[in-house]
Image: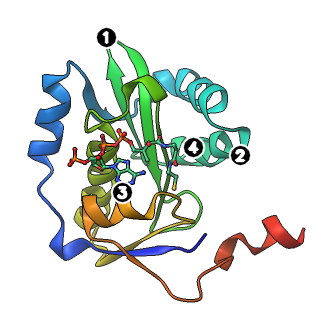
Amino acid sequence: MADMLVRLYNLPPLEPALARAEQEGIVVRRGEPWERRKVLTFVNEQFSESWADEVRLGYARNPISVFVAAEAGEIVGFAAYHTTRLDFFGPEGVREDYRGKGLGAALLLSCLWALHWEGYGYAVIGWAGPVDFYKKCCGATVIEDSEPGVYWSLKRG
Ligand SMILES: CC(C)(COP(=O)(O)OP(=O)(O)OC[C@H]1O[C@@H](n2cnc3c(N)ncnc32)[C@H](O)[C@@H]1OP(=O)(O)O)[C@@H](O)C(=O)NCCC(=O)NCCS
């Protein structure tokens, strides 16, 4: 899978994405230190151990570079940045029964706006699986010859 590039100076607005989630009764916000274990368990159980490892790194930063989607305190989605590498977005995941409600877009835009406010001009979506999702939600474009890129050791050991 290739990486994708996002122009952080031309992002869609964040507020409508957060409001759409709110209408579903779900809050999308930055992760809090006291729920670190809960979030790591969620990522590990719903996705993978290696994604949990990356998210752990986001929890070592201050401010925490992980956003979560939560319903009445229960984690139903997450997204991280500055984890695989500085200025990289990902990993991200929404629990299967919560997909299609706009949470993936709200989590993605929360991270990208955070990078914008930090002063970055561009961000990289690392090893982008759902390319059309990223094209649609933030106008990302595929970076040529970026595979396996920084993930080369996963293939070559
Ligand atoms: C990719 C993922 C995060 C999307 O989450 P989601 O909450 O279902 O996404 P949203 O509801 O916010 O979708 C936003 C828009 O993108 C579209 N979309 C969602 N997934 C898509 C896909 N795989 N391909 C193309 N479009 C997609 C939706 O139709 C929606 O369009 P709309 O605004 O017109 O309604 C979720 O499917 C997931 O967790 N997948 C498994 C993990 C994964 O692949 N993560 C990415 C790793 S790089």
Q: Nearer the viewer, mark 2 or mark 3?
A: 3
Disc 1 + disc 4, Cβ < 8 Å: no
Query: Which residue is disc 1 drawn over?
Result: 72
* Among numbered discs 1 and 3, the one appearing first in the sequence: 1
Query: Which residue is disc 2 drawn over?
Result: 50
Counting from the top left corner in percent of width and height, residue 101 is at: 26, 32
Q: Nearer the viewer, mark 4 or mark 3?
A: 3
* Residue at image point 20% right, 31% down: 21
Disc 2 + disc 1, Cβ < 8 Å: no
Query: Which residue is disc 3 drawn over?
Result: 133
* Vertical arrangement, residue 154 with respect to residue 71, above or below: below
Counting from the top left corner in percent of width and height, residue 98 is at: 37, 26
Dot 2 amino acid type = Ser
Secondary structure of the residue carrying numbered label 2: helix
Q: Nearer the viewer, mark 1 or mark 3?
A: 3
The CA distance from mark 2 to mark 1 is 27 Å
Secondary structure of the residue carrying numbered label 4: helix
* Vertical arrangement, residue 118 with respect to residue 2, above or below: above
* Among numbered discs 2 and 4, the one appearing first in the sequence: 2
